[in-house]
Image (cartoon, rainbow, N blue to C red):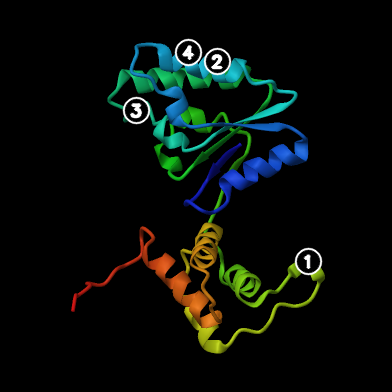
Amino acid sequence: VLMSGPPGTGKTQLAAEIARRLGRELVYKTASDINSMWFGQSEERVAEMFTQCDPTSEILFLDEADTLLESRETSVHRANTAVTAEFLRRIEAFEGVFVCATNHPRLLDAALMRRFTFRLEFQPLNTRQRERLLCEVALGWNPERGAAPPTLEPDVSARLGRLDLLTPGDFANVMKRVQSLQLTLDVHGWVDELEAEHRAKPGHSRSAMGFV
């Protein structure tokens, strides 16, 4: 499985949920677990990562795959090309569940992309999802109880509607900040904090800032 999308969209959480539902342990790996300054050791670590994973009791999860498995056509480093080639060989023989997550799928090697049976694209929250999450965190709405979500004020809905880059991770950041600072916010205050998260995201058009 290849999961791609912006940070905070829930790729790691989904990998953990897959492992939980299958009753297996999630083996978490990043490029730092693979890369080595010594010649040939990175490829050895790739081999060990697959051979040491028990396909009956574990799921292998590689996060930030684009930092490790870049396209061999554009790579200028022989070591990176060798690592990608070793991944291709190991994936073909691996009988377990292998999950990759990346923020930049276009950087991945084309041959590697074809090896994934499932390719899932994660996107920022849509308007309805943003409104429902705001009702949960700011108004205490619990969707599991079956009640309809509270109706938001028109100006709140309008402000929230413009925050089209928000992800679940942004809501989680605001919740951590509120709890850490012991803030008491009304729904407008929550939107203020979400707007701050949105302004900090790559791709958001920023206006010039002055200082007084």
Residue 74 visible in the snapshot: yes
User: Callout 4: helix, strand or loop?
Assistant: helix
Which residue, as the protein is rendered here, is positioned at the far bottom?
154
* Amino acid type assigned to the residue bearing label 3 in the image: Glu
Q: How crowded is mark 2: few (under 14 residues within 10 Å), some or many (20 or more)?
A: few
User: Callout 2: helix, strand or loop?
Assistant: helix
First in residue order: circle 3 vs circle 1: 3
* Amino acid type assigned to the residue bearing label 4 in the image: Glu
Q: What is the spatial separation of the Cα atoms under label 2 and label 4, in whole angstroms?
A: 6 Å
Q: Percent position (x, y) of residue 150?
A: 68, 81
Q: Nearer the viewer, residue 123 or 63?
A: 63
In the rendered structure, the answer to whether residue 51 lies left or right of residue 188 reads right
User: Callout 3: helix, strand or loop?
Assistant: loop
Q: How crowded is mark 4: few (under 14 residues within 10 Å), some or many (20 or more)?
A: some
Q: Mark 4 points at which residue?
A: 44
First in residue order: circle 1 vs circle 2: 2
Q: Which of 75 and 197 is in front in this view?
A: 197
Q: Are marks 3 and 2 in contact (CB under 8 Å)?
A: no
Q: Mark 3 points at which residue?
A: 73
Answer with the quarter of the image where residue 200 lies: bottom left
Q: Name the residue under label 2.
A: 48
Q: Are marks 4 and 3 in contact (CB under 8 Å)?
A: no
Q: Do the residues labelled 1 and 4 touch (CB within 8 Å)?
A: no
Q: Percent position (x, y) of residue 76?
A: 27, 25
In the image, what residue occupies the spot 36% across and 60% down? Answer: 203
First in residue order: circle 3 vs circle 2: 2
User: Callout 1: helix, strand or loop?
Assistant: helix
Q: What is the spatial separation of the Cα atoms under label 3 and label 2, in whole angstroms?
A: 26 Å
* Amino acid type assigned to the residue bearing label 1 in the image: Glu
Answer with the quarter of the image where residue 42 lies: top left
First in residue order: circle 1 vs circle 4: 4
